[in-house]
Amino acid sequence: MTEFLEYNITLNLPNQLPERQLIANTINPHSYCVAKEDEVFNQALLTSDILVPDGVGVVWATKLLYNRKIAKISGFDLHLHFLELLQKNGGGRVFYLGSSPTTLFLIRARIEREYPKVKVGIWSPPFKEEFTVEDNQEMISKVNSFQPDVLFVGMTAPKQEKWVHYNKAGLDSKVICSIGAVFDFYAGTVKRPNEFWIKLGLEWLPRFLKEPRRLWRRNLISTPKFVLEMIRIKNNLF
């Protein structure tokens, strides 16, 4: 599993759209732990073209194990990067797949204000544990009929990464990013912690205090497990 940290972490984001399809994902201590138990999710992360360190735990682990100093790059940063890239280069097309219609309408309205050269397509898939073949065909059809330069998928991890992993060959988009909670942050339906907490590397704390029932496993189980595993790996490697 250390290949995530040693080989796959991306430190520089592209400054132009790729010629071939590019898959971008994020990794944090919780997704690391989930991937250990979920082989499809594991493969989805390992085969990413871009895998950004979306968590101070990953930054710390990379320094601990390989003495590499890297910066945290959040899913929110990844999202803004591609919007700004399209705006700067004369415009483009983005598609948001996931979340509720209300959230998607708010996202589109904000992009129309902030990135007027960027055209937006949206689709809210059904909220269910697993999609049917018909669901998948409809989702792929909605994306491909819009022909986006960038497809943002927001269905929560690991569902979103696995969906992209299974369906990427049929998706007509130059870039595909799984960014989960960013949909709600950007729409304003969920408030992102302010810059004070982000700079301290404690963005997780206000979110946990606000939604302990949803985030307790991530912060109270996955994070300690991740820290202990990194220390064990450190002792085994050196």
Image: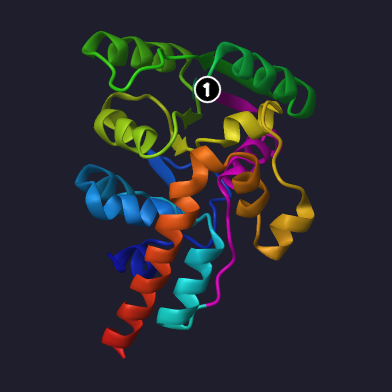
Q: Which residue is nearer to you in this view: 203 or 144?
A: 203
Which residues are drawn in magenta? Answer: 69-94
From where the camera sits, is residue 23 visible? yes
Q: What residue do we see at 40% from left, 12% from top? A: 126
Residue 8 is inside the magenta segment: no
In the rendering, at what x and y percent does residue 23 appear? 39, 42
Residue 36 position by quadrant: bottom left
In the rendering, at what x and y percent does residue 179 appear? 50, 38
Picture quarter with the C terminus: bottom left
| Callout 1: SS | strand
What residue sits right under mark 1 in the picture? Answer: 95
Q: Amino acid at mark 1?
A: Phe
**Which class describes the residues within 10 Å of circle 1: few (<14), some (14-19), or many (20+)?**
many
Picture quarter with the N terminus: bottom left
Q: Quick check: 104 left or right of 109?
A: left
Is residue 107 depicted above or below 43 in this figure? above
In the rendering, at what x and y percent does residue 160 appear? 38, 33
In the rendering, at what x and y percent does residue 32 appear? 36, 56
Q: What residue do we see at 45% from left, 37% from top? A: 178
